[in-house]
Every structure is written in C-alpha cells, then in structure tokens.
Image: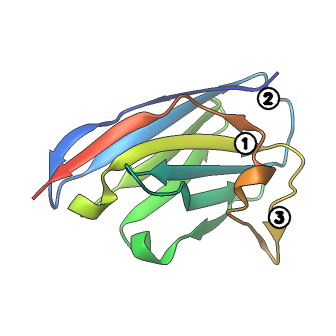
Amino acid sequence: QVQLVESGGGSVQAGGSLRLSCEVSGYTYSKICMGWFRQAPGKEREGVATILTGVGVTYYTDSVKGRFAISQDNTKNTLYLQMNSLKPEDSAVYYCAADVNVNSLGPGRCGFVTNAYTYWGQGTQVTVSS
C-alpha cells in the first residue's frame, strides 16, 4: 500500500519561493508516474508537474514552466516541488499523487490524467499574497 505525506506548504508573498515535499512509503516500483496537482477553491483539480521515476522525465503545465521544478530523492523516498517566483494564482491545496500502473504515461512523459493516479496525499495549503 502506497502512502504519501506532503509537507512544506505555507504563506508567502508574490515572488517568493516554497519547496513542497512528499514522503513516499510502501513504494517498491522502480518506474512509476508521480505528480503534483493543485486545487483552488471553486476550481477543478489540475496537474502541475509529473515525473517518471527511475528515468527522470518531467512534464509541467504551461503556467508553471520555468518557475517550478519537480524532482525526486530516491535515497529518501521523497518527491519535491520547488516553486519559485510564486504568483497569487498559484494559491491552492497541493497534492502529490502516484500512478503505479503508469496509466497516465503518454509520449515520453507522464500526463495529468487524474483518474490514473490511484494514490494521493492529504494535501498541503499554499497561499500567495500580492
């Protein structure tokens, strides 16, 4: 059973940075899709970034390209999301998720097919003030 626990959220002013962490346990697969998603009040959950573990291929939604970076530390079984140049529109609850069957794998990268991600963390709040 895969368990995901996020941390690192908080409040920051526009232009600031935060690093989210997602500690993964029960994970024995060498290559799966893992991703960060976010959901703002009144909006649908959207994909932010994904990584194909063991390979390192990453994918980002257009609005965060050049500002966010997803990475993994296999020695710590931890997924990260480094968020720089934060904007008020980045405010949301951020979730990490795992697609252990790589059903979201598309041409060369893991996609944002929410239903393909079967394991989710509890979420961590990110608030960016202007």
Which residue type does callout 3 highlight? Leu
Where's residue 45, x and y in %? 54, 54
SS type, badge 3: strand
Q: Is residue 72 left or right of residue 94?
A: right
What's the CA distance linking mark 3 and mark 1?
A: 12 Å
Q: Are marks 1 and 2 in contact (CB under 8 Å)?
A: yes
Crowd tier of the residue under label 1, counting other residues whose Cα lies within 10 Å: few below 14, some 14–19, many 20 or above: many
Residue 56 visible to an observer of this rendering = yes
The residue pinned by badge 1 equals 98
SS type, badge 2: loop
Where's residue 122, x and y in %? 54, 28
In the image, residue 128 sits, relative to residue 9, either above or below, namely: below
Residue 86 visible to an observer of this rendering = no
The residue pinned by badge 3 equals 105
As drawn, the label of residue 27 is: 2
As drawn, the label of residue 112 is: none
Q: Earlier in the sequence, mark 2 or mark 3?
A: 2
Which residue type does callout 2 highlight? Tyr
